[in-house]
Image (tube, rainbow, N blue to C red):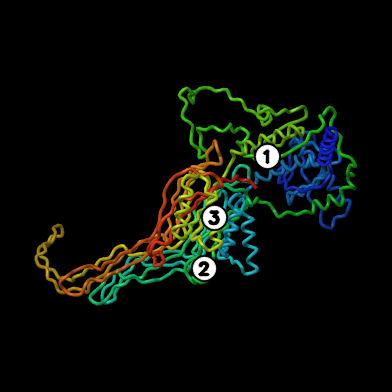
Amino acid sequence: MKRLLLAAVLVSTLNAQEGKNAWSIKTYRLPDPGLVGGFISSEHGQLKAPPMPAADAKEEAIIEFVKKSHFAVRDRLTAEGITLPPGTLTAFDPANKTVAVRTTQDTHDRISALATRVERELSKFVVCHLEIIEADAAEVRTAVTKAMTKADHRDAWEALDALIPANKARVAASLRLETKSGARATAEGGEQRLYNSEMTLDESKRSSTANEERRAGTRLELEPVIGPDGRTMEMNLSVEHHHGPPLDRWDTINVSGEKTVESPLVDFHVARVTTGLTMLGGMTKLLGIWRPEGGDAAQNAGKLQAAFLTANIVTLLPALDTRVEEILRTHGEKVEKTPSAPPAAPAGAPKGIITRTFHLPPDILTMDDPNPSMAAGGAALLADPFAAAPAEAKLMVRMTAMDILKSKGIPFPEGSSATYTASTGELLVRNTQPNMQLVEAFIASRKQHAARTLVTTVHVIEGDAATIRKLSHDTAALSDHSAAWKGVEQAVSEGRLKILRSTFTEGKGGLRSSFVSGVEHVYTTETSVSSVESSHSSNTGGDDKNKPANVSNVTIQGSTPPNFTSAVEMREVGIKVEHEGVIDYADPSAVEMNFSVEHHYAPPSTTAQPPPAGDKTIRPLDRRVKFHQAQITTGTTLASGLPRLIGIWRPEGAPEFEGGGKWQAAFIRVDVVPVER
C-alpha cells in the first residue's frame, strides 16, 4: 500500500511538473522604456523594438517584424536575468506597450513578475465610486453578514445590486471621484441650503437675520495613498449623505402681550461616516448602514440604506490591444515551430524544482516573532539603556530573501533560489515540492501578523423589560455572548424583539472612526428683548479739533418697538458611534477597544410655557428643550467575531414608554479581517 501511495505522489508531482513545462501563449503589459525608446545591449549595441506592421501588411513583413521584435525582447529579458528556453518566441507592440510570449509556464512566471514590476513604476491614480443603495432592512442586514469577516465586500454589493432590476432596491445616491496618491479630493451634489442662525425682529415685523450655509445632499471626501507595491492603499475618507429632505419648522422664542414671537428653524436628516481603511486596488468596501428618515414615513418603514465605495488603482496606460498576440498565434509557427516536448533540464540541475510567486508586504520576511510587550497599534518598546549611541559605528549585514528563509531552517539545494522584489512585493521561489511547502508554512505564519483591519457592528434592540433583563443576567459572567445574540435574532424573526438601529464601520487599528445617523436638530439657545431709543444731543466746546467735545444736554425723543433676538445651535439626534481599536500583537484575535455609543430613543421635545396673565407676576417665557438619550463610553477587550452586550436602559420621553414596559439594549461585535483577497 505504501508503494502505491508513493507511486501516486510521484505521478502527481510529474504531472504538475509537466504542466509547468507546457507551452502556451500569454500577453503582458510591459511598459519598458528600453524596448519603447531603445537600449544599449552589451553584445549587439543599440537595440529598439520595431513598430507594429500595418493592418494590411503582407505576410513577409509580419514575419520579419516578429523576428526583429523577438531579437530585441530576448536581449532585454536576458539583461533582466530571464533566460528563455529554446522554442520561446515573443512579439512586442511599442505603441500599446504589450508583449505576447510563447514559452513554458515556468518562464511565464518570471516574465509576469518582471511585467508587474515595470508596470508598477508608471504613474497611477485612484478612481473611486460611491454608491448608496436602499433596500428592505432584512436584505441589507444579510448583506452586512457577508461583509463582516471579509476584506472585500463585493459580494454584499452584488447581492443588493441584483435587487435593483426587480424594483426591490434603488440607488439613493452615486458619486464618482478620481485623484492622485496623497491628494485630498471632494465630490458633492445636492441642494445648497441657507438657514437662519441669528434673527432680530420687532413688532412692526422688521427683521434682520444672519444665515449659515449647508448642503443637503451627498458629499465624499477622501485622501488615498498608494503603497510601494502598487496594489495596496491607505484611504482616509468621510462620507455624508442626507437621507431625507430638510424639515422646516417654527419655534416660539418669546411673547409680547397676547402675541407670540417665532423663529424659523430647519432640521437635516443626515448620516456621516469618518474612518481610515487599508485596502487593495479593485476592492469594494461597505462604509455604513442607516435608516432613512424624513419625507414619507410609510415609504421609509422597514428600509435601510448601505453605502459602498469601490476604489481602483489605475495605471497610466493605453487600452489593451491584443493584436500583437493575434500576430504571434497566426504567424509564430512560420517563424519558429513550437517544440513538441518540454525543454530539457540543464546538465547537473536537480530534478523536481518548481517555481512559485508570493505577494508579500515589504517587512513580512524580516518580521520578528510576536513580542508580548508590543501592541499592533505601534506602541514602542521601552528604551534600552545599554543600546549603542546613535553616533556609534555599527556593522550592517544585508540579508537576501534566500538568507532569511535559510535562517528559518528551509533547505535550498543546488539550482534553487529565492528573490524578493520590494517594488512589487513579490517573492519568487524556486525549490523542491517538500521545501516549497516549508516556505508556504513560514509565509502563512508571518501573514498572521500582517496588515489587518477592524470591522465593527453595533445593534440597538428593543423588547419587553423581562426579556432585556434576562439577557443582562444571562451574560453577566460571560465574555462570549453569541448564544444571547442568536436568541435575539430568533426573537426578532418571531416579532418578540425588534432591531431599532444597526451600524457598520471599518477602520484601521489605532485610528478613531465615527458614524452618525439621524437628524441634525437645530434649536434655540438664546433669546433676548431690547428697546432701541432715538435721542438728540447738543455739544459745547470742542472748537479746537484736537480737544474732545463736552456733552451738556441729551433729550430723549421717543423709542421704537422692542426687538426680539434669538440664536441657535445644532445637535445630532439619532445614533452616534465612535471607536478606536488596537489589535493585540501577541494575540491578533483580541482587540483593545475604546468606544462610545449614543442613542436617542425619542425625538427632542420642546415646551414653551407663556407667562401668567396679569400685572402682579412677571415671568419670562419658559422654554425647555429635552433630549432623550442613552450613552455608553468605555474601554474593554473584545474577541474577534464574538458579539458582546454592552448596555441596557429604560427609555422615556414618548407615550409608548410610559409604565416602563419596554427596555432597550446594545450589542457590539468587532472582526479582525486580514487585508487580502
Disc 3 packing (10 Å; few <14; some 14–19; many ≥20): some
- Residue 292 located left or right of residue 282: left
Amino acid residing under circle 3: Gly
The percent position of residue 185, horizontal first and vertical second, equals: 53, 55
Q: Which of 16 and 214 is in front in this view?
A: 16
Q: Which mark is residue 487?
A: 3
Amino acid residing under circle 1: Glu
Q: In this view, does 288 lie above or below 592?
A: below
The residue pinned by badge 2 equals 301
Give the image quarter of residue 545: bottom left
- Residue 103 located left or right of residue 627: right
The residue pinned by badge 1 equals 426
Q: In this view, does 375 lie above or below 290?
A: above
Give the image quarter of residue 354: top right
Does dot 2 land on a helix, a strand or a loop? loop
Q: Which is in the foreground here, disc 1 or disc 2?
A: 2
Of pointers 2 and 3, the one earlier in the residue sequence: 2
Q: Is there any visible trace of residue 593 in the rendered image? A: yes
Q: Do the residues labelled 1 and 2 touch (CB within 8 Å)?
A: no
Q: Which is in the foreground here, disc 2 or disc 3?
A: 3
